[in-house]
Image (spheres, helix red, strand yellow):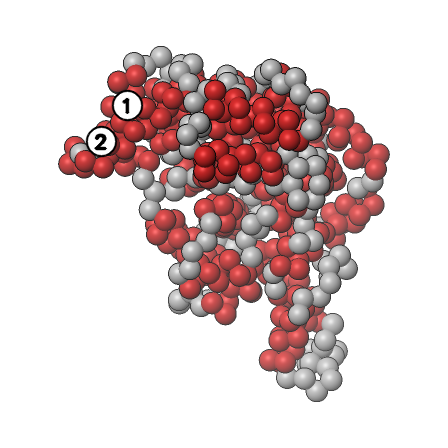
Amino acid sequence: MSKQVKKDISSNHDRDYTKVVKKKMDQYLFSDDNCDDEKEIHDICDYDLNGLLSYINIISNEPLFLEGVKELCNSHGYLGNGTRKSYCAFIVDKAIKNNVLSPDDKRAISSFRQTINNWLRDDEKRETPKDSKDSRQNVYKLCFALELSYEEVCVFFRKKYLCMPFNLRNLDEAVYQYVLKNKLGYEKALYILNKCNDYINHDNNMINDDSIISTRSFGEFSEGVDLEDFIQACCVNKNYFNHNKESIVNKIWDLMHELMNKYGIENKRLEIKNIPKMLHYIYYGEDVEINHLKAFRDENGKPKDDETEIELVKKFRKYSYKFGKTRINALPPKLAKNMPSEAQFARIYRGESVSPDVLRKMLILLVFFNYYLGDSDDTDNIMTADYETFVISLDSELCKYGFMQSYIGNPYDWIFHFCAKHDDEEGFDPIEVFQTLMMYYTSASNVSEEK
């Protein structure tokens, strides 16, 4: 199956196909309405791997965030000469005018100006904000500075930032949603946050688990509610916004161990030496190792060239096991950023710090594989009908650990949505589709060998 899919990718992924996808994407990305993202993006890719490749490549090469910032400035009073310096000055001035920045805080002004300047570069040094807590804070400051409406913030996040707005497991973002929906402004957001933080820091005994509410109900609660009632809800439900990083790492650890057991890599404790093999099975599949080793064996199945079995496996690992920096760099930039790698999983194993974005991507990857490998060896009953169940399961895990739910417009998240929903009438399954895509980008013919 995978060979046929790979052949289809290689032969059909051409310029004409990309033009069709680009036309559909322009209609979607440059419309300013809150449309059905899932339907629109599935239609753009036409449920086809070639469409998926075109989508990823276009998203990786288009300066969507840069153009989005300029469009917002142009529609909110900018009358400058079109230079980066003038756009930057306009945004900073608006931030001070609308009390997003204090005119007396020179350090904050300088830092924000440098951030905006980096976003607006039109060369290879341009920075697109990450989907991290600090980066999202700066994007929200931009939105408040330009006095965007709640609807405008939603569209900008989804179509230009390629992230879902308003993570309601984060107190700051829950407050931002409230003030935007109720047209209260950034100053009021700071007032609410200060009140909540004072309460949280001093009134720890008033909290009980029974008061914690769900993401959906909290989002609904934020609209049309009295300010003091909203503040009280945030305070009483403070545990709802607390996320223990250690519990997230433990979850990653458990999922790694579960996946290794399913692949038969180990049955007792997690060992760092098995991480490369786990990642190889994830990105390329079990059969690749078997088929690769056949090329080094004679007709009796013994190693050629007087090599021992151990030497043979070492040779395979040297050139094929690693999913490290070289292979990751072969991916389009939007996928390569913080793609779970051997080094990152090893940091988890050693108890070292990794970024929240890395943890989120690890969680998505491991939930996807554990879900579709199932509890037994029988995966023949994996059907596209499982798509919605998978998304619910994935989003539940992400929300549980304080991460933003998966978003189909984000290229990394979209890979897993696409693979889960891929039409398997031809005998495809989500894991094979994922591995075919990874092999297309990172096969030995496309990247140099890692040392």
Residue in the foreground of this view, choosing between 17 and 77:
77
Q: Which residue is mark 1?
A: 231
Mark 2 Cα-neighbour bin, 10 Å: few <14, some 14–19, many ≥20 = some
Q: Position of residue 136 (x, y in %)?
A: 49, 35
Examine the rendered structure and indicate whether residue 414 appears above or below residue 445. Answer: above
- Are the residues at dot 2 and dot 1 in contact (C-beta closer than 8 Å)? yes
Examine the rendered structure and indicate whether residue 308 appears above or below residue 421. Answer: below
- Residue 25: mark in rendering: none
**Residue appearing at x 60%, y 36% in the figure:** 117
Residue in the foreground of this view, choosing between 233 and 384:
233
Q: Quadrant of residue 396?
A: top left
**Residue appearing at x 80%, y 35% in the figure:** 17
Secondary structure type for disc 1: helix
Indicate the amino acid at tag 2.
Tyr
Image side of residue 375 versus residue 194, left or right: right
Measure the C-alpha gap from mark 2 to mark 1: 10 Å
Q: Which residue is mark 2?
A: 199
Secondary structure type for disc 2: helix
Specify the quadrant that holds the C terminus.
bottom right
